[in-house]
Image (spheres, rainbow, N blue to C red):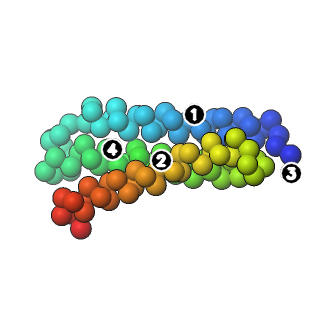
Amino acid sequence: MPVTDGRRFLLMVVYATWVMVFAYAFIAYSRAPYEGPGFPDGLNKPAVYLGWQGIAGMLALAVYGIGLRWPKGSAVRGLSALPLVIAVVHLLAIGAVFFWAGGF
Protein backbone atom coordinates (compact mmCIF):
# COMPACT_ATOMS: atom_id res chain seq x y z
CA MET A 1 0.00 0.00 0.00
CA PRO A 2 1.56 3.33 -1.00
CA VAL A 3 2.12 6.01 1.59
CA THR A 4 0.03 9.08 0.84
CA ASP A 5 0.68 12.71 1.67
CA GLY A 6 -2.14 12.53 4.21
CA ARG A 7 -0.36 9.78 6.11
CA ARG A 8 2.91 11.69 6.00
CA PHE A 9 1.18 14.77 7.39
CA LEU A 10 -0.62 12.73 10.07
CA LEU A 11 2.65 11.13 11.18
CA MET A 12 4.35 14.52 11.26
CA VAL A 13 1.57 16.10 13.36
CA VAL A 14 1.32 13.20 15.83
CA TYR A 15 5.12 12.96 16.15
CA ALA A 16 5.41 16.71 16.79
CA THR A 17 2.62 16.49 19.36
CA TRP A 18 4.44 13.64 21.10
CA VAL A 19 7.65 15.69 21.27
CA MET A 20 5.78 18.67 22.75
CA VAL A 21 3.88 16.59 25.34
CA PHE A 22 7.01 14.63 26.32
CA ALA A 23 8.95 17.87 26.86
CA TYR A 24 6.03 19.56 28.62
CA ALA A 25 5.94 16.80 31.23
CA PHE A 26 9.27 18.09 32.56
CA ILE A 27 8.11 21.71 32.47
CA ALA A 28 4.83 20.86 34.20
CA TYR A 29 6.75 18.94 36.87
CA SER A 30 8.97 21.92 37.60
CA ARG A 31 6.00 24.29 37.84
CA ALA A 32 3.65 22.10 39.89
CA PRO A 33 3.29 23.02 43.56
CA TYR A 34 4.83 20.55 45.97
CA GLU A 35 2.07 21.00 48.53
CA GLY A 36 -1.26 22.70 48.62
CA PRO A 37 -4.59 21.81 47.09
CA GLY A 38 -4.49 18.47 45.35
CA PHE A 39 -2.80 15.28 46.42
CA PRO A 40 -1.49 14.96 49.99
CA ASP A 41 2.12 14.56 51.06
CA GLY A 42 3.76 16.22 48.07
CA LEU A 43 2.32 13.89 45.45
CA ASN A 44 1.33 16.81 43.17
CA LYS A 45 4.62 16.93 41.28
CA PRO A 46 4.92 13.21 40.48
CA ALA A 47 1.23 12.98 39.59
CA VAL A 48 1.51 15.85 37.12
CA TYR A 49 4.66 14.36 35.59
CA LEU A 50 3.26 10.85 35.28
CA GLY A 51 -0.01 12.17 33.86
CA TRP A 52 1.74 14.01 31.04
CA GLN A 53 4.04 11.06 30.43
CA GLY A 54 0.96 8.84 30.18
CA ILE A 55 -0.39 11.09 27.45
CA ALA A 56 3.00 10.97 25.74
CA GLY A 57 2.94 7.17 25.96
CA MET A 58 -0.43 7.02 24.21
CA LEU A 59 0.88 9.31 21.50
CA ALA A 60 3.95 7.07 21.18
CA LEU A 61 1.64 4.14 20.44
CA ALA A 62 -0.14 6.24 17.82
CA VAL A 63 3.14 7.24 16.17
CA TYR A 64 4.22 3.60 16.05
CA GLY A 65 0.88 2.51 14.61
CA ILE A 66 0.99 5.14 11.88
CA GLY A 67 4.61 4.28 11.10
CA LEU A 68 3.75 0.62 10.45
CA ARG A 69 2.33 1.66 7.06
CA TRP A 70 5.82 2.42 5.75
CA PRO A 71 7.88 -0.37 4.16
CA LYS A 72 9.96 -2.60 6.43
CA GLY A 73 13.51 -1.35 6.85
CA SER A 74 12.67 2.25 5.94
CA ALA A 75 14.02 5.09 8.03
CA VAL A 76 10.54 6.44 8.75
CA ARG A 77 9.41 3.11 10.15
CA GLY A 78 12.51 2.92 12.32
CA LEU A 79 12.03 6.45 13.63
CA SER A 80 8.37 5.80 14.36
CA ALA A 81 9.42 3.13 16.86
CA LEU A 82 11.67 5.57 18.76
CA PRO A 83 8.92 7.16 20.92
CA LEU A 84 7.68 3.71 21.91
CA VAL A 85 11.18 2.59 22.85
CA ILE A 86 11.64 5.74 24.93
CA ALA A 87 8.28 5.12 26.64
CA VAL A 88 9.22 1.53 27.52
CA VAL A 89 12.63 2.58 28.84
CA HIS A 90 10.92 5.32 30.82
CA LEU A 91 8.50 2.79 32.34
CA LEU A 92 11.36 0.48 33.27
CA ALA A 93 13.26 3.36 34.90
CA ILE A 94 10.23 4.53 36.89
CA GLY A 95 9.52 0.93 37.96
CA ALA A 96 13.14 0.52 39.04
CA VAL A 97 12.95 3.70 41.13
CA PHE A 98 9.72 2.52 42.80
CA PHE A 99 11.23 -0.91 43.46
CA TRP A 100 14.45 0.59 44.81
CA ALA A 101 12.49 2.96 47.07
CA GLY A 102 10.39 0.09 48.43
CA GLY A 103 7.18 1.27 46.81
CA PHE A 104 6.08 -2.19 45.62
Q: Mark 4 is on which residue type?
A: Tyr
- The answer to whether marks 2 and 4 mark residues whose Cβ atoms lie closer than 8 Å is no
Badge 3: how crowded within 10 Å, few (<14), some, or many (20+)? Answer: few
The alpha-carbon separation of the residues under discs 3 and 2 comes to 28 Å
The alpha-carbon separation of the residues under discs 1 and 2 comes to 15 Å
Residue 1 disc label: 3
Classify mark 3: helix, strand or loop: loop
Relative to residue 20, is residue 71 drawn left or right?
right
Could you say where residue 63 lies in the image, as x and y percent from the top left?
A: 61, 46
Q: Earlier in the sequence, mark 3 or mark 2?
A: 3
Relative to residue 46, is residue 61 drawn left or right?
right
Q: Which residue is mark 2?
A: 86
Tell me the mark number nearer the camera, choosing from 1 and 2. Answer: 2
Q: Mark 1 is on which residue type?
A: Ala
The residue closer to the viewer here, 40 or 96, is: 96
Could you say where residue 10 lies in the image, as x and y percent from the top left?
A: 69, 39
- Residue beneath the point at 60% across and 49% down: 81
Count up the numbered dots. Answer: 4
Could you say where residue 39 lies in the image, as x and y percent from the top left?
A: 20, 50
Could you say where residue 22 lies in the image, as x and y percent from the top left?
A: 45, 39
Looking at this view, name the residue that lies furthest to the bottom. Answer: 104
Q: Mark 3 is on which residue type?
A: Met
Q: Which residue is mark 1?
A: 16
Q: Earlier in the sequence, mark 1 or mark 3?
A: 3
- Residue beneath the point at 37% across and 48% down: 51
Q: Earlier in the sequence, mark 1 or mark 2?
A: 1
- The answer to whether marks 4 and 3 mark residues whose Cβ atoms lie closer than 8 Å is no
- Residue beneath the point at 40% across and 44% down: 52
- Residue beneath the point at 74% across and 37% down: 8
Q: Mark 2 is on which residue type?
A: Ile
